[in-house]
Image (spheres, rainbow, N blue to C red):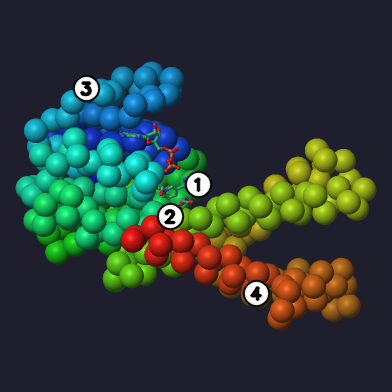
Amino acid sequence: MDLALVNARGLVLLGCGKMGSAMLAGWLARGVDPASVWVLDPHPSDWLTATGVHINAGVPDAPAVVILAVKPQMMDAALPVLVPLGNGSVVFVSIAAGTPIAKFAALLGAQTPIIRAMPNTPAAVGRGITALIGNDHVSPDAMTLAEDLLSAVGQTLRLQDESQMDAVTALSGSGPAYVFHLIEAMADAGIQQGLSPEMALHLARATVAGAGHLAENTTEDPSQLRVNVTSPGGTTAAALSVLMDADTGFPALLSRAITAAADRSRELAK
Ligand SMILES: NC(=O)C1=CN([C@@H]2O[C@H](COP(=O)(O)OP(=O)(O)OC[C@H]3O[C@@H](n4cnc5c(N)ncnc54)[C@H](O)[C@@H]3O)[C@@H](O)[C@H]2O)C=CC1
Ligand SMILES: O=C(O)[C@@H]1CCC=N1
């Protein structure tokens, strides 16, 4: 990461909730100087206060980058304070779901370098994945700076077109919630089969975490990993006949869920 630029010119973070604090923790761990960070948030947490960054203390005249991490519904109210930084060399990076680059250009000025990014909550443990796309005013160096900042909390991926962002938001942005719900549902099903709640949750959490780790650390694709678990005529085959049902199984259910999330992302853009 080009810490020299960030530490020399400063970084502004608008909104330091779940995602803002996950990113800030990653930047500080990579050596960003707290004295170079200006956070604007009406409800600073104790954790934020203890970091030593500037909190609600104005912003520098020309920071290297501004990160927008408030809820999409708060953007109209929160952004005006940053308009003086628009239309210049300051790079804006928004992680807000559904909010198009065009909206920021309208609010901040048409010449503003704006990057839209979609991270996810595993960023809190350095295991997020963030997709990014910038407008024509974003220089290659600015894009690299944004990638460096987001790679402090996980992997990054460049999109070819902003229209891909709704699908990305529905898949990887919201996706951790689907997996957490899978853990909840597996644990509940284990309880129904007679396990204690503690043991069921322990088994479900470790199984999902272990399967995810295996999926990411093997050359075999997920369908082969599934086959590897499945003995002919065995227990897994019995479960998969339910989960792979064309009408009521996982594929149909997840297709409906991800379609609903992508549709909501498109609605937020209006
Ligand atoms: N939570 C998630 O899984 C993900 C969220 N996002 C996006 O990240 C953004 C933030 O989401 P979260 O961190 O989950 O929300 P959050 O509610 O945890 O954090 C939002 C923060 O904004 C602050 N805030 C409210 N009004 C403000 C204002 N006028 N000026 C400055 N700060 C203000 C709040 O005090 C709060 O700390 C959203 O736009 C969301 O779409 C993106 C990817 C994943
Ligand atoms: O639910 C939301 O709108 C945000 C965006 C992706 C994850 N959380």
Tag 1: residue type?
Answer: Pro
Against 219, residue 204 (above or below) is above
Residue 17 is situated, as x and y percent measured from the top left of the image, at 42, 35
Whichever of labels 2 and 1 marks the residue nearer the N terminus, that label is 1
User: What residue is at 47 percent from the left and 40 percent from the top?
Assistant: 124
Crowdedness of circle 1 by 10 Å Cα count: few (<14), some, many (20+)? Answer: some
Residue at mark 4 to residue at mark 3: CA–CA distance = 50 Å
Whichever of labels 2 and 4 marks the residue nearer the N terminus, that label is 2
Query: Which label lies toward us, 4 or 1?
Result: 4
User: What residue is at 84 percent from the left and 51 percent from the top?
Assistant: 190
State the residue in front, 99 or 6.
Answer: 99
Residue 42 is situated, as x and y percent measured from the top left of the image, at 34, 26
From the viewer's perspective, tell me whether residue 175 is left or right of residue 139.
right
Corner quadrant of residue 12: top left
Tag 3: residue type?
Answer: Ala
User: Splitting the image into four quadrants, where does ligand 1 fall?
Assistant: top left
- Label 1's element? helix
Mark 4 CB within 8 Å of ligand 2: no
Tag 2: residue type?
Answer: Ile
Residue at mark 2 to residue at mark 4: CA–CA distance = 25 Å
Against 76, residue 218 (above or below) is below
State the residue in front, 24 or 226.
Answer: 24
From the viewer's perspective, tell me whether residue 186 is left or right of residue 176.
right
Q: Which residue is mark 3?
A: 57
Q: Which mark is residue 129?
A: 2
Residue 170 is situated, as x and y percent measured from the top left of the image, at 48, 62
Q: Which residue is mark 1?
A: 122
Assess whether mark 1 and mark 2 are in contact (beta carbons under 8 angstroms): yes
From the viewer's perspective, tell me whether residue 143 is left or right of residue 179.
left
Q: Residue furthest bottom?
A: 246
Assess whether mark 1 and mark 3 are in contact (beta carbons under 8 angstroms): no
Tell me if residue 227 can be seen. Answer: yes
